[in-house]
Image (cartoon, rainbow, N blue to C red):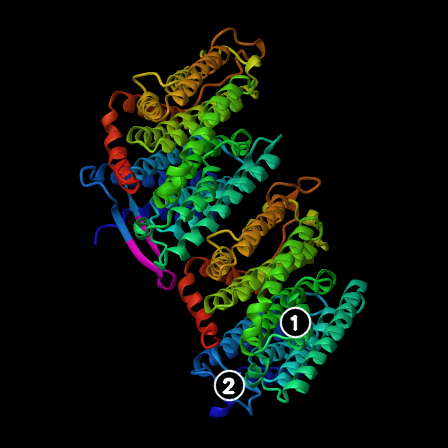
């Protein structure tokens, strides 16, 4: 019996949330330190799991299985494969940086960190669950704290609207998938929610074609797929910085990941049938998202819509059902997670100081906030897929995959690269360079050292992966191999 | 001695009620009396719960007392529910100003509980009717207990009028059954209802109407909001949980014992009723500004969810309905407990009374969070697994559309439950001086809240054993 790494990772945030709640609201310092300690602990363990994962052996590792309810075949079944291991790591990183950046939250930090950690627990849970019931269980746990986090600590103008919209969208998605999952459960006749068993069940093609769409789209809503992407920019903008980071950085991957795991992996025939549709929707995501982002004047909305565009690439990668596309999508999930986390952190830092996110009103921020400026520049390079950065490692294979499937789509999708390059560079120029408006002179205090650590960590990862793809590609490839087997060795 | 075991809980409840009345006159001081009444009742009920669990567990189902009662797990499980709900309600009663000085209130609570226990285990029409009336009459009085309060009086009176009417309808149905079958024993009746004809439809309709009133199924739900709003909050909590569960116990028993063949034909009608109940309850709940009314409509909706399990009409379906009722009972008691505490301090049940609750009492707000999220069906609370099982049972039996209606409804539900949380956590009091307006929680209420919160979380996480109990209750029904 080895040390139960995964359940410890999943339950650390939960326990920390409860521990924080037992503290007095006034002990703000203790609350923050507890939160950071727990986050660091979770990160340390997820690093251990990531590097302890044997890429050659592949398959599911660090597996733990506890019978939870044998009657229905529900078990607490955890395990990581090459696709989920990077995402677990990503969650750990975003959690730590998120806590660092939220250090200054002064309104009820106790509740803030408690809700944030319950959310984190849910996210970890989804990534490592190999049981369909538990996947839903953790998925919902990841959804509801979002509402509270946005509504209480969010941007005052839109928080109520955005929080409700986001929660309802995500909940609708999850319950639609839930119906599909239950139908799968009873149809399989296997009397188990264990996805490893359900993977081996051969559902009839007709069944798969009928049920693939609700299951996949239900989850893909959280991945921001068109035309259900609407909640995401609003939600991102209304959320407080750390929550936006979590949200765009990790939560959207949750949707994409679950859509892959439950939709594509359990219903491969359905995936093959509907792949063109998914591809079409993802194409709209990519191009339309990029164009919408380019006309935004609110810094945070730009990032919000760019997430829609980038998540479209992930969906597109899935829809190719080709090794290159899936591999790229896997890397893109990680790379985009880090990149958006950085973007939102940067936006938050600028907004906290300038009290506006209106791009025309900003300027010259590089002087008082050099590190933030560098961060955003690197993030921009990643987001346009510049070689040498993680974005390239992700986007290039995706485009290769698309090209092999449907070259027209690849050409159209490539437009987005140009558009993305234009708007991110424009934003960088307007916000960080040029002349600083007079009202900001001397009113922009520098960022503190915790913020700096967080930014540097995120930047280092993006460059690191760009220069050493071997840090992530073998993992993802081993995971993709399994997906391909399920798809019939294509 | 062995013969008394099947009615051990009832016997002990009666003894407790008598003791309460006998000892009450010795309490002179107001504070002591409140303490005595509440603690004595709650502890007594706890002891009954433990004793029954230890000594009065049923084995194979048998008919006892000349076929009047059936000693089985379904009845036993529900009985334990009622006793628990009554104990918790007794604790909440202690904070209710005009309730906590009157031994009658506690006595009525106990008598109603006896009635429910009989409802859950009766296997004879006569006994069943007696059980229903023994439950209802004390509840009418409890609902109208605050005699000086117009709303409470109205609530009690309304409840009684509606109740009497539906009892008459129910009784008429029973008399027809007896007239045509010549027996009142539920388990002998099954043979007489093996055909699906006009007569069976008519009788089932009458009986169903009477029972649908008890569990507030559409279209017999109209009484619930007015009654809940007017009656003292802990009473409303008891009404919406234990009383509803008792109604379901009877429905489950009748449908499985008497109308099993018809039920397959009837299930479409029941399914439509369940769907309408959920939808109507949830849609109207969205528009409510009074939390008690909102909870009343939500409890109508929840009756619809539980009904899904019954409609599925399989062992798993019944088990999931029972499990649903368990989770719902705990959660709703918690919700009404919180409403009672807030109402006691602020003097209002309006949603705006919850402004700034998150700052006025952070712990109470967390309890509210648990309650409302569990009602909305969010993990890791009881509501999620309960809904999951109910929907699973519907899909197992091929009722996919009903499950879809159910999940759509849970979205409606989520909306208004989240809305309340917005008042609790986001909105502030008029002068933003929440620090000056703490919400104190009395010790008995604290105990009750803690027990309920733990219960809701336990059911939501370690659901295996709990579902095992529920499944046991559904055993031997088919």
- What is the chief secondary structure element of the magenta stretch? strand
Is residue A347 shown left or right of residue A333?
right
- Does residue A257 appear anywhere in the picture? no
How many residues crowd around disc 1 within 10 Å: few (fewer than 14), some, or many (20 or more)?
many
Q: Which residue is mark 1?
A: B208
Residue B258, x across and y down, in percent: 57, 78
Q: Residue at coordinates 41% horizontally, 36% vertically from top-left?
A: A256
Label 2 SS: helix
In front here: A382 or B55? A382
In front here: A34 or A12? A12
Q: Residue furthest left?
A: A56
Q: Give the Cα distance between marks 2 and 1.
A: 27 Å
Residue A430, x across and y down, in percent: 50, 11
Q: Is residue A372 above or below residue B19?
A: above
Q: Which residue is mark 2?
A: B6
In front here: B407 or B88? B407
Front of the two marks 2 and 1:
1
Q: Which residues are magenta?
A: A65-78
Count of number-bearing discs: 2
Residue A479, x across and y down, in percent: 27, 38
Label 1 SS: helix
Is residue A132 shown left or right of residue B440?
left
Please state, as top left, top right, bottom left or bottom right, where the C terminus of chain A lies in the image.
top left
């Amino acid at each position: 019996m080895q040390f139960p790494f995964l359940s410890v990772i999943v339950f650390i945030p939960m326990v920390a949330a409860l521990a924080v709640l037992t503290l007095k609201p006034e002990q703000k310092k203790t609350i923050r330190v507890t939160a950071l300690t727990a986050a660091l602990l979770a990160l340390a363990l997820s690093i251990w799991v990531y590097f302890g994962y044997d890429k050659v052996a592949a398959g599911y590792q660090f597996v733990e299985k506890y019978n939870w309810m044998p009657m229905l075949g529900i078990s607490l079944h955890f395990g990581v494969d090459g696709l989920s291991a990077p995402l677990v790591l990503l969650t750990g990183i975003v959690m730590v940086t998120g806590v660092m950046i939220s250090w200054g939250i002064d309104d009820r930090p106790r509740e803030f960190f408690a809700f944030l950690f319950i959310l984190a627990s849910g996210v970890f849970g989804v990534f490592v669950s190999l049981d369909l019931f538990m996947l839903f269980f953790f998925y919902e746990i990841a959804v509801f704290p979002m509402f509270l986090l946005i509504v209480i600590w969010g941007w005052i103008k839109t928080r109520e609207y955005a929080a409700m919209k986001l929660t309802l969208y995500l909940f609708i998605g999850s319950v639609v998938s839930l119906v599909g999952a239950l139908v799968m459960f009873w149809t399989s006749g296997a009397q188990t929610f264990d996805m490893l068993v359900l993977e081996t069940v051969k559902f009839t093609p007709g069944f798969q074609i009928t049920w693939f769409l609700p299951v996949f789209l239900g989850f893909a809503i959280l991945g921001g797929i068109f035309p259900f992407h609407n909640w995401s920019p609003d939600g991102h903008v209304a959320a407080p910085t750390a929550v936006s980071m979590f949200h765009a950085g990790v939560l959207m991957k949750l949707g994409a990941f679950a859509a892959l795991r439950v939709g594509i992996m359990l219903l491969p025939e359905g995936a093959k049938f509907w792949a063109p549709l998914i591809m079409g929707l993802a194409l709209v995501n990519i191009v339309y998202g990029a164009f919408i982002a380019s006309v935004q004047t609110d810094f945070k909305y730009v990032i919000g819509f760019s997430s829609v565009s980038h998540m479209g690439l992930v969906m597109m990668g899935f829809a190719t059902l080709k090794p290159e596309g899936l591999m790229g999508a896997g890397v893109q999930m990680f790379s985009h997670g880090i990149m958006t986390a950085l973007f939102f952190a940067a936006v938050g830092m600028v907004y906290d100081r300038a009290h506006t996110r209106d791009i025309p009103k900003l300027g010259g921020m590089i002087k008082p906030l050099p590190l933030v400026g560098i961060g955003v520049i690197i993030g921009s390079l990643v987001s346009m897929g510049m070689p040498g950065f993680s974005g390239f490692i992700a986007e290039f294979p995706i485009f290769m995959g698309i090209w092999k499937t449907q070259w027209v789509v690849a050409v159209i999708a490539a437009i987005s690269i140009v558009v993305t390059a234009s708007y991110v560079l424009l934003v960088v120029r307007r916000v960080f360079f040029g002349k600083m408006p007079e009202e900001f002179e001397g009113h922009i205090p520098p960022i503190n050292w915790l913020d700096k650590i967080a930014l540097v960590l995120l930047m280092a990862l993006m460059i690191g992966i760009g220069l050493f793809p071997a840090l992530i590609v073998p993992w993802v490839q081993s995971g993709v191999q399994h997906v391909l087997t399920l798809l019939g060795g294509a | 001695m062995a013969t008394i075991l099947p009615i051990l809980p009832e016997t002990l409840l009666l003894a407790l009620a008598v003791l309460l009345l006998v000892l009450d006159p010795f309490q002179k001081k107001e504070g002591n009396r409140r303490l005595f009444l509440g603690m004595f009742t709650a502890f007594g009920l706890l002891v009954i719960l433990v004793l029954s669990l230890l000594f009065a567990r049923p084995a194979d189902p048998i008919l006892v007392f000349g076929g009047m009662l059936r000693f089985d797990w379904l009845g036993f499980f529900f009985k334990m529910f009622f006793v628990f709900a009554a104990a918790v309600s007794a604790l909440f009663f202690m904070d209710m100003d005009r309730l906590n000085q009157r031994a009658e209130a506690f006595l009525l609570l106990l008598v109603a509980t006896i009635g429910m226990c009989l409802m859950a285990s009766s296997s004879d029409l006569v006994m069943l009717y007696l059980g229903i009336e023994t439950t209802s009459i004390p509840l009418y009085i409890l609902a109208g207990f605050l005699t000086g309060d117009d709303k409470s009086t109205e609530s009690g009176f309304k409840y009684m009028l509606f109740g009497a009417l539906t009892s008459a309808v129910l009784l008429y149905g029973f008399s027809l059954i007896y007239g045509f079958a010549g027996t009142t024993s539920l388990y002998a009746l099954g043979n007489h209802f093996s055909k699906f004809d006009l007569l069976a439809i008519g009788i089932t309709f009458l009986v169903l109407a009477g029972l649908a009133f008890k569990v507030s199924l559409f279209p017999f739900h109209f009484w619930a909001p007015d009654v809940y709003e007017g009656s003292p909050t802990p009473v409303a909590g008891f009404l919406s949980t234990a009383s509803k569960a008792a109604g379901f116990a009877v429905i489950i028993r009748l449908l499985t014992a008497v109308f099993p063949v018809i039920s397959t034909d009837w299930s479409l009608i029941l399914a439509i009723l369940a769907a309408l109940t959920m939808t109507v309850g949830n849609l109207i709940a969205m528009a409510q500004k009074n939390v008690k009314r909102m909870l009343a409509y939500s409890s109508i909706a929840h009756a619809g969810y539980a009904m899904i399990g019954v409609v599925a009409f399989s062992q798993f379906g019944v088990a999931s309905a029972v499990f649903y009722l368990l989770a719902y009972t705990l959660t709703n008691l918690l919700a009404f407990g919180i409403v009672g505490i807030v109402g006691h301090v602020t003097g209002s049940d309006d949603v705006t009374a919850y402004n700034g609750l998150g700052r006025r009492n952070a712990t109470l707000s967390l309890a509210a969070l648990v309650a409302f999220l569990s009602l909305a069906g969010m993990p890791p609370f009881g509501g999620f697994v309960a809904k999951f099982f109910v929907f699973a049972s519907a899909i197992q039996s091929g009722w996919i559309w009903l499950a879809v209606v159910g999940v759509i409804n849970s979205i409606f539900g989520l909306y208004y439950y989240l809305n309340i949380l917005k008042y609790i956590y986001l909105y502030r009091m008029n002068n933003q001086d929440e620090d000056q307006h703490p919400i104190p929680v009395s010790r008995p209420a604290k105990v009750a809240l803690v027990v309920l919160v733990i219960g809701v979380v336990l059911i939501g996480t370690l659901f295996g054993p709990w579902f095992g109990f529920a499944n046991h209750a559904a055993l031997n029904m088919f």
